[in-house]
Amino acid sequence: MKNKLFAKALPHIIAILIFLIVSLLFCKPALEGNVLGQDDIAGWKGIAQNAFDYKAVHGQFPLWNPNLFSGMPNFLIVMNGKSILPDLNAVFGLGLPEPINFFFIACICFYILCLALGTRPIVGIVAALAFAFSTYNPVIIATGHITKMYALCYTPLLLAGMILTYEKKYWLGLAVTTLGTYMLIGANHPQISYYFFLIAACVTLAYLVNWIRKKEWKHIALAFGITLVAAATGLMTNSLSLLTTTEYSKATMRGGKSVSIDGDKVQAANTKGLDTSYAFQYSLMKTEPLVTMMPNAFGNVTPTGRLDENSAVVKKLTGQGVPENSAVQLAGNLPSYWGGLEFSGGVPYIGIFIVILSILGFVLLRHPLRWGLLAASVLAILMSWGKFFPGFNVFLFEHLPLYNKFRAPSMSLVILELLFPVTAALTMQQLFFSPGAKETLKANFKKILYTLGGVAGVLALLYVAMDYGSPIDQQILSTNFDGSGKDTIGRLIVSGLKSDRSGMFGAQVLRTFAFLALMLGLIWLYLKNVLKPAIVVAILGLVTLTDLLLLDSKYLNEDLYHSRDDVHTSSFSKTPIDDEILKDKSIHYRVYNAGQDKFSSSDYRVSIFHKAIGGYHPAKLRLYQDIMERYLYGNPNPQVLNMLNTKYILTTDPQNGQQAIIPNPSAYGPCWLVKNIKLVKDDTEELQAVGATSLGDTAIVQQSLASLAGQPQWDSASSISLTKFDNDVVEYSASCNGPQFAVFSEVYYPYGWNAYVDGKKVDYVRTDYVLRGLSLPAGKHAIRFVFEPASYKKGITLSYTGSFLVVLLVLGGLFMAIREKKKEG
């Protein structure tokens, strides 16, 4: 009995060992205690530092973070949860250090999916390694997109749960679907989750058509019921992040806008979600998804890839009399990448054998998944085109629920990263391991020849027909002139670039032809009984893994690892400027970075030690974004800096990069009383009035809120001051000789900030477009602003309850599945 169990377990043990060994070897520096210097992680740690400092004192994270963008909810950065579940990321990753754990988890989850699909272990190993080491993964890991990587890791786990349920393994399906939903949503990357739900919809529809044909009504009810219960439980356990994020999104750039800003001009607008110009910023040209199988087709795969002295640009320029040194220097400043993105951070290469097997699968597979996989794959490619296929994508943007909350259409190719290895795994299983596989393969050999020949023919036609133009060409033409003001030089450069691009694409076409020939040769050797099916699959897997790892190493290599101390020193150490500012022991003030890196990913450094006007976060409050665009992006408006209580301004010398401090004694402070109120009609008038009003004397309020903002009876003897600043609780003391109106230099956020005067809850108003204002009666008053969002309290309760249900459904489902298995035995 023990020998039988061990024999059954052995292939899976071998698979786990292979995943572990490959992950360890690829990320060897991590075993030596080194870490990646990830820019996004440094940025996150920088803006989260205030929260960690707060927790060290109070034992819990605050709900509001004052150290970026003058204040925003902290639960978008880091927050406390409540669950009975352990850290399952550590469990799945065997406690391995980053980034080893990411590759290992991705392998394990995809291997589980392959087992759910009924493939042989060797097929699962090959497909899992291809999924885990697809080049998009090391690209995002090196950058620091950790939540995205975790989400990608768990997409195959959730798909496995759905497949098990749809294939009538109900109890096991319940357990895995519940766990997969919990882990995917818990990774907290909504865009990856959204793409998965598009996959789930296509897969479910494909199965549903098959069930309806067979009139399996009971199975339909059971499958949908189990999937919905499992999904609802997984969602419930993540209620804390879902509720708070959903609420916050209403007030962000992703919630739409009421004004449109163009320089000094402000116009009324009424949009929902992101602008299409912003959302479609990272779109792929129509032929560019070919990089999933031809990685260098659109230029050098490295982010800093440039042309060299062998470029056709150099030959074109020198042929027209340009000195060789000048031509080489000019070419060296030109990007090798010529696709639709603004810059190439890497390619989503999946492996040429995986893509070829997928194409064969769409032709040959006899599986309910076939059409669902094809539909989702085609949809992903169309979506990735973004602005290069506007009719279709604008329609989706305006009509597909929630789609207008996301940007970067190119990211939709993660759908292919998941589905192509799935299709390839099913294809390998059918071609080499299904009953009568060899006879079926012989019968379909002509189809295989026609399919591969069709792929080769399409690539050859593209090579001949493409004009090799790029969006960057117009910029080159408009910035490169000769002495007479003509664009002759620009035209020579573009002509040379097109020759270079043709060579790049052509080389990749030839590379593809070689791989097609190799695959046909392996199939022929198998049909001639020279190679066993397991050997064929092993060769395909070994070539694929080697191919991927060679490319992966360009994005994630030893040069990117550093000691922890070095990373901390370079990213988080105080500067003499920080020490100088921190000598100021005032309760509350802000710092504005006016240097070259303001409002960029490098602006996080100010947030480490100070309450910053800027910062780094992809989802800023809409009101604050409007203020930034109108008054802070160029030369900052002094009035706006004053109302934001900017006491110190940092400048950078462009010559030597040295920072300097400019004190701002004109800052209004944390609160002040105004002499009068200026009523405006709408957001457009209010935003424009901010730059044309003496904000220290006058508060700007919209007419619709006039009943909450009566005209003050200002006198010089009245006063207001800040007495306590504690992230979630801000207290003031006021002495008013008559009715007054106070302005507080705190960002207006309606979802949770409540005002109390002398212990009684009162209404406050949005003032000066982005701040808070409050009418005060005569007398002495204690004022408290408390951040107590109901979504957080509700989310804590639901998440904690959901964690019990996850344990119950996962363990209960596994128990019942084992019990059924024993009964069958």
Image (spheres, rainbow, N blue to C red):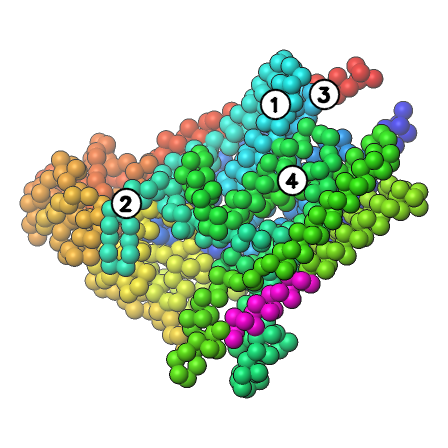
Seen from the viewer's position, the closer of residues 349 and 82 is 349
Q: Return the x and y of residue 429 as percentages of the image width and height.
A: 79, 36
| Mark 4 residue element | helix
Q: Residues within 10 Å of mark 1 (few under 14, many from 20)?
A: some
Quadrant showing the C terminus: top right
- The image shows residue 418, relative to residue 672, as above or below, that is above
Residue 562 location, quadrant: bottom right
Seen from the viewer's position, the closer of residues 120 and 171 is 120
Seen from the viewer's position, the closer of residues 342 and 575 is 342
What residue is pinned by disc 3?
Answer: 817
- CB atoms at circles 3 and 4 under 8 Å apart? no
What residue is pinned by disc 1?
Answer: 208
What residue is pinned by disc 4?
Answer: 419
| Mark 2 residue element | strand
| Mark 1 residue element | helix
Q: Amino acid at mark 3?
A: Ala
What main secondary structure does the magenta stretch of the protein show? helix
Q: Return the x and y of residue 377 as percentages of the image width and height.
A: 60, 40
Alpha carbons under labels 3 and 4: distance apart: 27 Å
